Every structure is written in structure tokens, then in C-alpha cells.
Image (cartoon, rainbow, N blue to C red):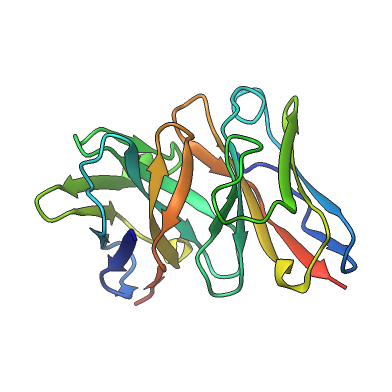
């Protein structure tokens, strides 16, 4: 299975909004509403930020939101803060009852 | 609070079998709501899902690793394990154990990760 495609890097100034895309196929992103997003700071385990395309776990800031259109899912971070600087990964359930992650996006706060 | 802790050798020789165990505390591995899985991350690279197991023993594997992977569960010890055979340097990575929800098909809890290096 091929990794989902994400931009290598996205940057923004404090207070701005940024969007990270995650492109797959009809066998994964496009076929199921089981897209998740994870935040990973250096040397740390990933943290769940969004599940089921657009749901936030308890404790995750409402500055994080998710959406999907066709085979592409998106994560939007609004009101960008210094603490948001991290790597972000999407993931999706697939038609082969497996999971696939995205290639990862490094978010830089300017 | 649920906790997952990986354990096992940090160094494995090429062609040998990598073996790791994940101990779950603060919750039961026999819950009907979750799968228990393994994910890895080579140094400086992205995440790769390896596979997962239900408490009954049902397993799902990454098709690209399926021929070399075995995941097992020991409900009496609240543990599950990973075996990866015929390892090469490309298998050097931080290995995470994690809990996957069945309803949302997502990973909601992660272990801290353990680095396994394949080298002679």
C-alpha cells in the first residue's frame, strides 16, 4: 500500500491559519470517513488531534479542524501558535482492512 | 489512565528476528472496543503501520510486511507482542505499540516508543 501524500512543509505566522492536505485514493481516504490526524513533537510519540475526518478528542483545542472532499482530507490550524510547530501525519483505514499513514508535514511557525 | 510500555532488545543482528512486547496498564486488553497495534518510524522518516490484533487473536497486517510479521496476545498478562523476521538495516526504527478504536478506526493511545537498531 502506498503512503498518503502530504506536503513536506507548511509555514505560517502566529495568528494565521494554515491547511495541510492529505491525498489518497478511493480505496482509503475517499472510501471511508476514517481519516485521523496526529501531531508529533521531536522525540515524542504522536498525539491524536482529529478522528473520523472532523471529530476532536477531548482536550484538543478547537483551533484544529478537519474536513474531506473526495480523495483528499485536510487539517486546518487556525490562530497558529508557537506550540503548534511539529510534524503532522494523516492516516486512513483502507479497503484491505489495514491502515495507511501520510508522508508527514512539518509545520513551522515563523 | 491507560499506559502502554514497549520492551525488548534495542539491538538485533541482520537476518535474525526482532521481538518486542507491549504491556498495557490502567485498562484491560480484553475490551471488545479496541484492537492493539504496532507502528514504526525509521529515524527521520514517517510512520508505518505494521499490524494489529484483537483480544480474541484476530490479526490484521500491513500487506507489505505480512510475510515477516507475527503479532500475538496474552490476555492473562495484559500484553501483546510483535515478531519481525529476517530483519535488515531497513527495519531500524522506533517501534510504538498503540491502542486502536474499532468504532473510529483510529489510534487514541500510544506507547513512548523504543528504538530498535539492526546491526551486526
B67 or B54, which is in the foreground? B54
B41 or A42, which is in the foreground? A42
**Residue under the image location 31 percent in, 66 percent down:** B6
Q: How many marks?
A: 0
B27 w.r.t. B56: above or below:
below
A49 w.r.t. B53: above or below:
below
Can residue B92 be seen at all in this image of the molecule?
A: no
Q: How far across and down, in percent of the image, does residue A29 sit?
A: 64, 31
| The N terminus of chain A lies in quadrant | top right
Q: How far across and down, in percent of the image, does residue B49 sit?
A: 47, 47
- Considering every residue shown, the one lying at the far left of the view is B76
In the displayed structure image, the side of residue B81 where residue A28 appears, left or right: right
Q: How far across and down, in percent of the image, does residue B37 sit?
A: 36, 48
B57 or B50, which is in the foreground? B57
**Residue under the image location 40 percent in, 34 percent down:** B102
In the displayed structure image, the side of residue A30 where residue A94 appears, left or right: left
In the displayed structure image, the side of residue A1 where residue A77 appears, left or right: right
Instruction: Quadrant for residue B31, please give it.
Output: top left
**Residue under the image location 87 percent in, 69 percent down:** A14
Q: How far across and down, in percent of the image, does residue B90 sit?
A: 48, 62
A64 w.r.t. B35: above or below:
below
A13 or A23, which is in the foreground? A13
Amino acid at each position: 500500500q502506498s503512503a498518503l501524500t502530504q506536503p513536506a512543509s507548511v509555514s505560517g505566522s502566529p495568528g494565521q491559519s494554515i491547511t495541510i492536505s492529505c491525498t489518497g485514493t478511493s480505496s482509503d481516504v475517499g472510501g471511508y470517513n476514517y481519516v485521523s490526524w496526529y501531531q508529533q513533537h521531536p522525540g515524542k510519540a504522536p498525539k491524536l488531534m482529529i478522528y473520523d475526518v472532523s471529530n476532536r478528542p477531548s482536550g484538543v483545542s478547537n483551533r484544529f479542524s478537519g474536513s474531506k472532499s473526495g480523495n483528499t482530507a485536510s487539517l486546518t490550524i487556525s490562530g497558529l501558535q508557537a506550540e503548534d510547530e511539529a510534524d503532522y501525519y494523516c492516516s486512513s483505514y483502507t479497503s484491505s482492512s489495514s491502515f495507511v499513514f501520510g508522508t508527514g508535514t512539518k509545520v513551522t511557525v515563523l | 489512565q491507560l499506559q502502554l510500555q514497549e520492551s525488548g532488545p534495542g539491538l538485533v543482528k541482520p537476518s535474525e528476528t526482532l521481538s518486542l512486547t507491549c504491556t498495557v496498564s490502567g485498562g484491560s486488553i480484553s475490551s471488545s472496543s479496541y484492537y492493539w497495534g504496532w507502528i514504526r518510524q525509521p529515524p527521520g522518516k514517517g510512520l508505518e503501520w505494521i499490524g494489529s490484533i484483537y483480544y480474541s487473536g484476530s490479526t490484521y497486517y500491513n500487506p507489505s510486511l505480512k510475510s515477516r510479521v507475527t503479532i500475538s496476545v496474552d490476555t492473562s498478562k495484559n500484553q501483546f507482542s510483535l515478531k519481525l523476521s529476517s530483519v535488515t538495516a531497513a527495519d531500524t526504527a522506533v517501534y510504538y505499540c498503540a491502542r486502536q478504536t474499532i468504532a473510529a478506526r483510529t489510534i487514541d493511545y500510544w506507547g513512548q516508543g523504543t528504538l530498535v537498531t539492526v546491526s551486526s
